[in-house]
Amino acid sequence: MNKIISALVLMAFATCFDSVSAAPGKVDAGSYIRNQGWKQYDTTSLPRSPVSDVVPLMFYDKGNSVPSCGVLTASAGGKEPVFIELVGSDPGVGFPQCLSIAAITPFKLQNKEYLVIEYISRETREDVDRRFHYLVRSPTQGFVTDTVLTEAAPVTPRGQGAAGTAPVKALDGVRFARLVQLGKAQPAWRLLERDIISDKSSSFSTFQDKTATKCQFITEAGAAPVVTSYDAFSPSAKCTSVLASSRLEKGGKVYYLAMFLTEDKKQFVGVTSVAADGNIAVEKNLAEMINRGAMTKDMKTAKAALLKAI
């Protein structure tokens, strides 16, 4: 019996040891900067990282009088940390310059852990841009660059409130990532960027197929998205267009609404919800109550009816 217990203890210890050794190591930003021969920039201007294994850096490279920046990521298995450059220039050139790392925002997408890093760079004397860099956690390498998202992300001139998908604040970086992923997942449908609602932990988007007179709505909360067809709320007529989307939060639960027009010129509302634990539900009964009560004149009316019912 004692031998069996000892064997079990050794197995548990070995498992624990393996998990520790495979975990990302510590990131010592100060030592890394000194070892590279860089001069550290004022660290009080840097945002706090939401994870311990990714650390933002701003520094002066050897012989350079303008700041560069990047992030230092821990490697699994006690290996050396990896530096990912955001902005850097050759000595004496002066451009580009890293003006700031504005934010590091965590989010989940398709069961993967992401970070979006918002930073400001001066490209020329006149041009200052807001950019995004995406990291995704690899099960074997720690956080690595998501090249597809990073290269696709639009660059916004600082101070301009650009329309469409151009990011102007940290959460817009999350919104853009979801837009790209959802668009790739539904290539045969037209994604209505106008209607995308992106929160810290969930999102809602609408799609149309005018040729087939169909519409669908996608709700996601970090895991596999839930696709809901319009006919879950209006089974008797085809959908000709999506008119609007909106959200309502109550009691820790987020409700998403989509208003659409059918071929017989009637307006209907579809409702889905995301609970605090990320569980997604198609709220057919709530939608039926709103539609049956003819509370679909506009989104304001539909939201008032929903708020009264929940």
Image: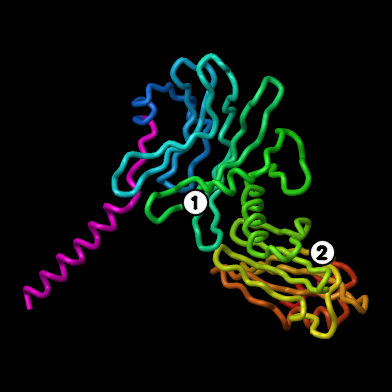
Q: Quadrant of the N terminus?
A: bottom left
Tell me where the magenta segment starts and ends, as one range.
1-30
Q: Is residue 42 left or right of residue 16?
A: right
Work out whether residue 273 or residue 208 is closer to the camera in this orientation and state it: 208
**Given the image, on which type of amino acid does mark 1 rest?**
Val
| Residue 40 locus on image (x, y percent) | 44, 24
Work out whether residue 86 or residue 99 is closer to the camera in this orientation and state it: 86
Q: Please report whichever mark, 2 or 1, sits nearer to the chain's N-terminal start.
A: 1
| Residue 182 locus on image (x, y percent) | 65, 61
Q: Which residue is mark 1?
A: 136
Residue drawn at point x = 93 percent, y = 75 percent: 265
Magenta span: chief secondary structure: helix
Residue drawn at point x = 45 percent, y = 52 percent: 137
Q: Quadrant of the C terminus?
A: bottom right
Residue 72 found in image quarter: top left
Q: Which residue is mark 2?
A: 244
Q: Residue furthest left?
A: 2
Q: Secondary structure at mark 1?
A: strand
Q: Is residue 112 above or below residue 154?
A: below
| Residue 284 locus on image (x, y percent) | 72, 81
Q: Is residue 268 above or below residue 59?
A: below
Crowd rating for badge 2 (residues with CA inside 10 Å; few <14, some 14–19, many 20+): some
Crowd rating for badge 1 (residues with CA inside 10 Å; few <14, some 14–19, many 20+): many
